[in-house]
Image: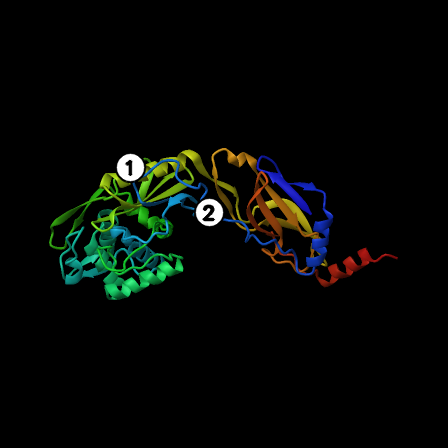
Amino acid sequence: MKWTRGFAGRFEPRAVTAVVALFALMVGITGFAPASAETIDTSAPLEAKAPFDLQTPSYLLMEAKTGKVIFEKNADERRPVASVTKLMTILLVLEELDRGVVKLTDSVFCSANAAGMGGSQALLDANVQYPLEELLKSTIVASANDSAVALAEYLNGSEDAFVKRMNDRAAQLGMTNTHYVNVTGLPAANQYTSARDVATVSRAVGQHPTFFKYSTIWMDSLKHPSGRVTDLTNTNRLIRFYEGADGFKTGSTNEAKYCLSATAARGSTRMIAVILGTPASQTRFDEARKLLEYGFANYQLNSLAKKGDLIGADVAVRLGAQSSVAAAVGSDVELLLGKGKERDLKLDVTLADTVPAPVRKGDVIGEVRVMLADELLMALPAVAASDVPYPGYLEAIMQILNNWKI
C-alpha cells in the first residue's frame, strides 16, 4: 500500500502497485523491510561555497539541531584554536553535572599549578577553595585559564588525566582532526582541531541548558575567599551586539590568530558559525555575523513530523487480537531548507499489505520517504503505533468460525 502526503493535506490512499504487492508477499512473514537510505547524501554542504568573500582562512556555517552544513571552507584543515579548546573542557564539566557526579555547589581546590596559569585568568588564589559554579562561570564568560585547570584537576586529579578524557570524548563525537594537549588552548606542540570539529563540540555543548545560563552574561564578578573581587567580561562581543547571540567561545594567540565559535537562535532555528585564523580580533566577529545573517536570511528549520505521529493509515494484522494496526512515523522529521522550499515537500509512505501477530509497538511496517519535488531527502521507518497480541482462546475460536467457509 502506498500513500502520499503534501504538507498542506492529509494522507490519501493511492493504488497498490504490483511491485509493492509482490514486495509485501516477500517480507510478509517478518514485516516490512524499508529500503536502505545509504544513498542519501546527508554530509554534503547545501551550497558549494559562500556567496561572498571572507578573510578567514577556515570557516563553516551549520544549523545546530540537524548538524547540516550550509557552506564551508577548509573545514577539515588542522589548526590551533587557542581558547576555543575550552569548549571540550566545558563540555566534560557539563556532562558530569548532568550525571550528578559533581554539583555546582561543590568546593573546588585551586592548586598553585592552576593559579599560576598565564593568559586570560580569573586571578584565582592558590591553595583555597572556590565554588565549582564560580569556576565554570569564569571559564565560560572570561575564558579563565586558571579556572579551567582547577576544574580539570578536580574532576580527574590532574590536567593530564583530564586531557585524556578530552581526547577520548573527541573520538566518541567523531572529531577526526582534533588532538588536545592541555585544557586551556595555550600554545602547545601537536595541539590542533578543525572548523568542523569545533562545530561538532559546539553542538554538544549547546545541548546543555546550563551552559547558556553563563554564556549570556556580559559582565559579572568573582569574589575570592580573601574578599577581593575580579571583574569578568564576556570575551564574545556578539553576546551584547548581535540579536539572538548566546554562545559559544573565543580564542586568540599569535599562533592561532583570532578564532570564534558563535551561535545565535531566532525562532526554532539555531545557527553555528565557526571562524578560525582571522587576522584581527574584530574581523572574527564581523565575519561570524555575516555568516549568521546569511543563514537566518536564507534558511529555516522545518519540523515536519514527530516520532509517533499517526500517518492516517492502517496495516492488516493476520491472526491478531485486532484486525489492523495504525501506522506512525518512526522518528522525528526535521529538515533545514531554503526559505520557501517547504511548499514543495511531500511524504511518500509505503506500507506492508499485512503483518503477522504478534505486533509490538515500534515494529517496522513500512517506510516514509521525504521528498522535495522529485528529490529524496530522507527515508525513515513507518512503525506500528500500538501492540497487537495474539487473540485469546475464545477470540481465536471466533476468528476460525468467522473465516470458516462451509
Residue 190 rendering spot, x and y as whole percentages: 27, 60
- Label annotation for residue 286: 1
Examine the rendering and report whether any part of residue 101 can be seen. Answer: no
- Label annotation for residue 44: 2
**Outermost right residue:** 406
Name the element at disc 1: helix
Q: Quadrant of residue 116?
A: bottom left
| 3 up-or-down from 321: above or below | above
Q: Is residue 51 left or right of residue 217?
A: right
Examine the rendering and report whether any part of residue 19 can be seen. Answer: yes
Between 192 and 360, the residue placed more toward the observer is: 192
Residue 24 rendering spot, x and y as whole percentages: 70, 54
Q: Residue at x 63, y 46 (%)?
A: 349
**Dot in front, 1 or 2:** 2
Q: Quadrant of residue 145?
A: bottom left
Residue 213 rendering spot, x and y as whole percentages: 30, 46
Q: Quadrant of residue 241?
A: top left
Colouring rule applied to residues: rainbow
| 109 up-or-down from 39: above or below | below
